[in-house]
Image (cartoon, rainbow, N blue to C red):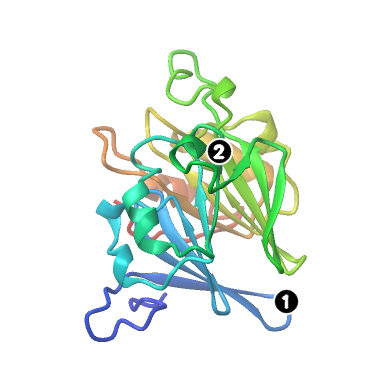
Amino acid sequence: MSLFSIFGGKGNQPTYPTDTVRYGEEGAVTFTFFKHASFAITIGDKHIYNDPVAEYAKYAQLPKADVVLVTHSHYDHLDRAAIDDITTRNSVIICDKTSAETFDGEAVVMTPGMKSQPLPNVVVEAVAAYNTTEGHTDFHPQAREDCGYVLTIDNDLRIYIAGDTEPTPEMLALENIDIAFLPVNQPYTMTVDQAVEAVKAIRPCVFYPYHYGEVEEKTDIERLQSELADVCEVRVFPME
């Protein structure tokens, strides 16, 4: 782990924790962790931002986005001000159909099962994201068609960003996932037990818990790491 931003951490630029995963013979992706569900993915000189929210990072001071992913319309995932700070007219915004109402036709609108290719070496596939537990289904109803995303990079590395969801049949059926970001935030997304179930089903090489904290019920990250120690590599970065 590097404690310096992928953007150099020089001058007035903010610094954030980062982590790099290498794949294939020469491939590498670097993740920069902001807070909650907001993070960035850098592939070479291309920058992808997931659910940017102005409260979580100084986006105006960061490199402009080639791609922005928005999973759903809740305030802690969709922030037009942050997106305006990070984008140019050449940036591609990919979002669910409810969030699309914010962008006046300027976004690529996805529903579960759809694919888009925002960069020559990156394919994005939308995956259904919703609650399944009785009493929780109004948080993220299936009918609203919120999205998680699978990014396939260089026809090789597959990164799953789950969005706000519990384990669903669509998630549990995913194959060949190399890196998974799963939310562990009770009661709105997964419990630790549900996250363990999901990781054991999709078997990523690397699992990043994200979207935890900021609620009264704290996530037991140590138990999550312990129960998955023999399943995959669990990498924990501060997202609270």
Task: Classify 55 as above or below 153.
Answer: above
- Residue 103 at x, y = what percent? 47, 43
In this orientation, which residue lies closer to the viewer: 46 or 191?
46
Find numbered disc 2 in the image and state the secondary structure of the residue it sits on.
strand
Residue type at mark 2? Asp
- Residue 198 at x, y = what percent? 60, 39
| Residue at 55% from the left image edge and 79% from the top image edge | 45
- Residue 72 at x, y = what percent? 48, 37
Q: Residues within 10 Å of mark 1 (few under 14, many from 20)?
A: few
Which residue position is annotated with label 2? 96
Q: Residue furthest top?
A: 135
| Residue at 53% from the left image edge and 55% from the top image edge | 229
- Residue 101 at x, y = what percent? 48, 35
Residue type at mark 1? Gly
Find numbered disc 1 in the image and state the secondary structure of the residue it sits on.
loop
Of marks 2 and 1, the one in the foreground:
2
Task: Classify 106 as above or below 96.
Answer: below
Contact between labelled residues 1 and 2, with CB atoms less than 8 Å apart? no
Residue 24's label in the rendered image is 1
Task: Classify 89 as above or below 81.
Answer: below
Residue 63 relative to residue 144: left or right: left
Residue 140 relative to residue 124: left or right: left
| Residue at 39% from the left image edge and 35% from the top image edge | 74
Count of all numbered marks drawn on residues in the image? 2
Quarter of the image with the N terminus is bottom left
